[in-house]
């Protein structure tokens, strides 16, 4: 069976060049064999070590994300200590409060509103690449993939983008944690302590907005009312923390994952150089193939039967997006990278009421950045002299740094890779 793409010429872009072994040991691909075994043999699995259920198949993951009545995002229902940590965090809310808060910012993140940022994102990308001074080496994360999305979200919120080294220090501390056990009190306290840095910083900016209105996202949240009530400082800060965190690190990973995929599939890179119109569908395939967020989680509100298993009420369920996106029951040839895969109903941005608010922004940033990278550099290859280091946190599926060999485009514009 070939790739699920239209033509024979499309099909040849699905051919990988790196060895199978190399592919399976690169960040973003390491757990795929295990996921396949789990999908086949234990699609709904109780893990005693983390005291959690785990769902691996596309159909189950999809069903869980689509049913917020049974599979809640509000962890404080099971673990009251989580309440403080989740205030204002719409990811950890159920309706009706979730709908109310999401409604306040959804306009700012609509595809139409985001499209207006195109010029700014392109200018920032060029500026960041200009700063590398025509070097023949880039560290993609430091030079572009981190500063680009964090500057965009900081500007939307209205906090100084110059503070981004601070956000990075705090975000790195959070993401260094390998343990993501949401019901573990000590782990939760550690996370809360790391988040306090973000919260103190944003609290200061909220206070300034209360003194003097400005038309940015923070200003809008300060002025917003739900049923005649203003949002509390803690709610605004919690919401803004989520936007600042979710708004940068995931897109950073997506950009790194895109370059890793193009490195493994040079035919795709060559095809994109001649036809940049295929960039959007290629980014969708990266999202499926190397999903930046490998999992999310829910808690059950009642006993439920799933995949032949009985899951009791108040149980933690890990929902493996990366496994669902490689499920052969849903995707033909899931281990092949098909730049024209259509349809491509991947779950990298989730599904249902919590579907990623920032998806249009992440897509736009990735499309613009990739287009500019391909236009500016004749050579764009992962530098084998530097080992690839994955995040310790198993939920974040990407590399912490990505050293590239690049060659700025020559006058003849010939491409070498
Ligand atoms: C490639 C980049 C990104 C990926 C892969 C991603 C992934 C996700 C996923 C899987 C969810 C749903 C989680 C769940 O259901 O438990 C989510 C929710 C969310 N994302 Fe993203 N995200 C990305 C970029 C962004 C950006 C750029 C922003 C904002 C600027 C953002 C803001 C949010 C917010 C606010 C939610 C919560 C939505 C809700 O609960 O209603 N994300 N994201």
Image (cartoon, rainbow, N blue to C red):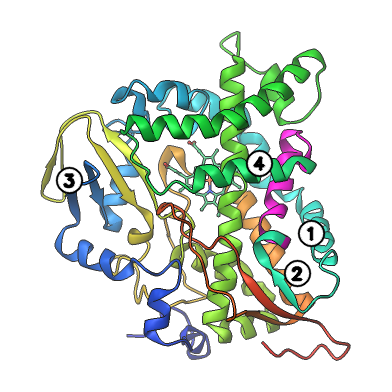
Label 2 to label 3, Cα distance in Å? 47 Å
Relative to 184, 374 lies left or right: right
Q: Secondary structure at mark 1?
A: helix
Label 2 to label 1, Cα distance in Å? 8 Å
Mark 2 — residue? Answer: 372
Quarter of the picture holding the N terminus: bottom left
Mark 1 — residue? Answer: 122
Q: Earlier in the sequence, mark 2 or mark 4?
A: 4
Q: Is residue 46 magenta?
A: no
Say if mark 4 contacts mark 3, CB within 8 Å: no
Q: Earlier in the sequence, mark 2 or mark 1?
A: 1
Magenta region: 143-161
User: Is residue 319 visible to us here?
Assistant: yes
Whole-percent x, y for residue 281 in the image: 56, 68
Q: Secondary structure at mark 2?
A: helix
Residue at the location (40% across, 75% down)? 25
Crowdedness of circle 3 by 10 Å Cα count: few (<14), some, many (20+)? few
Mark 3 — residue? Answer: 48
Mark 4 — residue? Answer: 167
Whole-percent x, y for residue 340 in the image: 52, 75
Tally the numbered discs.
4
Q: Residue furthest top?
A: 228
Label 4 to label 1, Cα distance in Å? 22 Å
């Amino acid at each position: 069976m070939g790739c699920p793409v239209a033509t024979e010429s499309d099909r040849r872009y699905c051919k990988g060049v790196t060895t199978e072994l190399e592919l399976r040991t690169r960040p973003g691909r390491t757990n795929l064999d295990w996921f396949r075994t789990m999908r086949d043999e234990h699609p709904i699995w109780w893990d005693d070590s983390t005291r959690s259920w785990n769902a691996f198949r596309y159909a189950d993951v999809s069903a869980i994300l689509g049913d917020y009545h049974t599979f809640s995002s509000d962890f404080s229902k099971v673990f009251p200590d989580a309440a403080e940590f989740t205030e204002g965090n719409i990811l950890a809310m159920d309706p009706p409060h979730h709908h109310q808060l999401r409604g306040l910012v959804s306009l700012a993140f609509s595809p139409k509103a985001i499209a207006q940022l195109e010029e700014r994102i392109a200018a920032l990308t060029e500026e960041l690449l200009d700063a590398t001074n025509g070097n023949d080496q880039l560290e993609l994360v430091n030079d572009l993939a981190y500063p680009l999305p964090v500057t965009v979200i900081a500007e939307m919120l209205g906090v100084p983008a110059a503070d981004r080294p601070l956000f990075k220090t705090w975000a790195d501390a959070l993401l260094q944690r390998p343990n993501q056990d949401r019901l573990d009190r000590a782990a939760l306290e550690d996370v809360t302590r790391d988040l306090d840095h973000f919260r103190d910083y944003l609290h200061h900016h909220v206070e300034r907005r209360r003194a003097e209105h400005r038309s940015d996202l923070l200003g809008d949240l300060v002025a917003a009312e739900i049923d005649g009530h203003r949002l509390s400082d803690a709610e605004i800060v919690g919401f803004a923390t989520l936007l600042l965190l979710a708004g940068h690190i995931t897109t950073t990973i997506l950009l790194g994952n895109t370059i890793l995929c193009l490195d493994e599939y040079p035919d795709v890179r060559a095809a994109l150089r001649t036809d940049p119109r295929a960039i959007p569908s290629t980014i969708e395939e990266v999202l499926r193939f190397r999903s930046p967020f490998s999992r999310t989680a829910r808690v059950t509100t009642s006993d439920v039967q799933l995949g032949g298993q009985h899951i009791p009420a108040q149980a933690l369920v890990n929902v493996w997006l990366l496994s669902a996106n490689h499920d052969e029951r849903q995707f033909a040839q899931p281990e092949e990278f098909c730049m024209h895969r259509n349809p491509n109903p991947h779950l990298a941005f989730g599904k249902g009421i919590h579907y990623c608010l920032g998806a249009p922004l992440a897509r736009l940033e990735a499309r613009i950045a990739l287009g500019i990278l391909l236009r500016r550099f004749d050579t764009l290859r992962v530098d084998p002299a530097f080992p690839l280091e994955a995040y310790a946190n198993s939920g974040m599926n990407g590399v912490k740094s990505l050293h590239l060999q690049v060659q700025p485009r020559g006058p003849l514009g010939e491409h070498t890779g």
